[in-house]
Image (cartoon, rainbow, N blue to C red):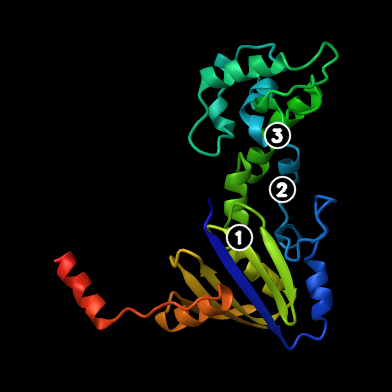
Amino acid sequence: MANIVIHKIEVSNCPNLAEVLEAVTTPADDPKIDDPNYFDFNTIIPEPPELKIINAPHSAASLAYFLTDRATSPLSRINLNRYDPAVYGSSDYKTVLNDMREILTMYDQNGNVIETTNNRYSGHYALPPTLDALYESGKAITTLADNHGFTNWYSTRMAIWGTRFNCSSSIRVEDGVIFDTAWSSPRSVIDAFAEKFNLTMTVKIAEEGHFFWYVLNYENGELVEERDCEDDDKYNLYLELFGYEIEEESEEDENTDEVTSS
């Protein structure tokens, strides 16, 4: 389960704040969910369009399908690792070849995907609707690599945003917005937000495992102060953002730690 990082942006002296916040807000992707994304990273630093084409769960197989010209040439002759779309580690040739062969059996003679209850190819892991779409998914991986230097959604987002997902939840507050991310903070997005709208603002950031916390101050779009994991900020940040008090370590506890470590 991801460690949550809470961010609170407080903007000051901004007469058009409502317009600024509206500019970074997008409707919910799921029509069943009423809440929009009040701080959509894509409105500030857009993802490359190729990511919308790539079928992430089956990206390696779609890449092989494209590089072998719709499975008409041997995969062994292809430098698969040049465009390796694996998020963690490298794609294994044999595994990719077997996956591609199995996936091709999931399409009918007209190139349309066959309905299935197989968990490997349904729900989140659903295949592209047609073989043409499978081909375009593989092609998008090579385009992403050639144009931007990335091969998958993870490397792209970590490079352009500094975190692997868009914010998971967000709310508007009187003078700004509060939003969550997983594991890390989108510092490049926050910097770009301040610069884009020439904002004077304070950003408070805290990670739930107490691994890091920050206070960032911007004036007219430029970062003028960064307080990184300072003890004086820790108590107030966790009380404000997470709603609980952090107990201060007593001298007795410190002495015990020293004896244990020695």
**Residue 73 place in picture, x, y as percent:** 65, 12
Relative to the observer, which residue lies in front, 128 or 174?
A: 174
Asked whether the beta carbons under mark 3 and mark 2 sit within 8 Å of each other, the answer is no
Residue occupying image coordinates x 64% and y 22% = 64
As drawn, the label of residue 55 is: 3
Give, as a three-letter code, the residue at label 3: Asn
Residue occupying image coordinates x 72% and y 48% = 48
Q: Secondary structure at mark 1?
A: strand
Q: Which label sits in the foreground, 3 or 2?
A: 3
**Residue 254 place in picture, x, y as percent:** 24, 76
Q: Secondary structure at mark 2?
A: loop
**Residue 130 place in picture, x, y as percent:** 81, 24
As drawn, the label of residue 181 is: 1
Give, as a three-letter code, the residue at label 2: Pro
Label 3 Cα crowd, 10 Å radius (few <14 / some 14-19 / many 20+): many
Picture quadrant where residue 200 is located: bottom right
First along the sequence among labels 3 and 1: 3
Q: Secondary structure at mark 3?
A: loop
Task: Name the side, left or right, on which 109 lies relative to 207.
Answer: right
Label 1 Cα crowd, 10 Å radius (few <14 / some 14-19 / many 20+): many
Q: Which label sits in the foreground, 3 or 1?
A: 1
Q: Which label sits in the foreground, 2 or 1?
A: 1
Relative to the observer, which residue lies in front, 61 or 75?
A: 61
Which image quarter holds the C terminus?
bottom left
Reading the image, the residue beneath label 2 is: 48
Whole-angstrom CA distance, mark 3 to mark 2, is 14 Å
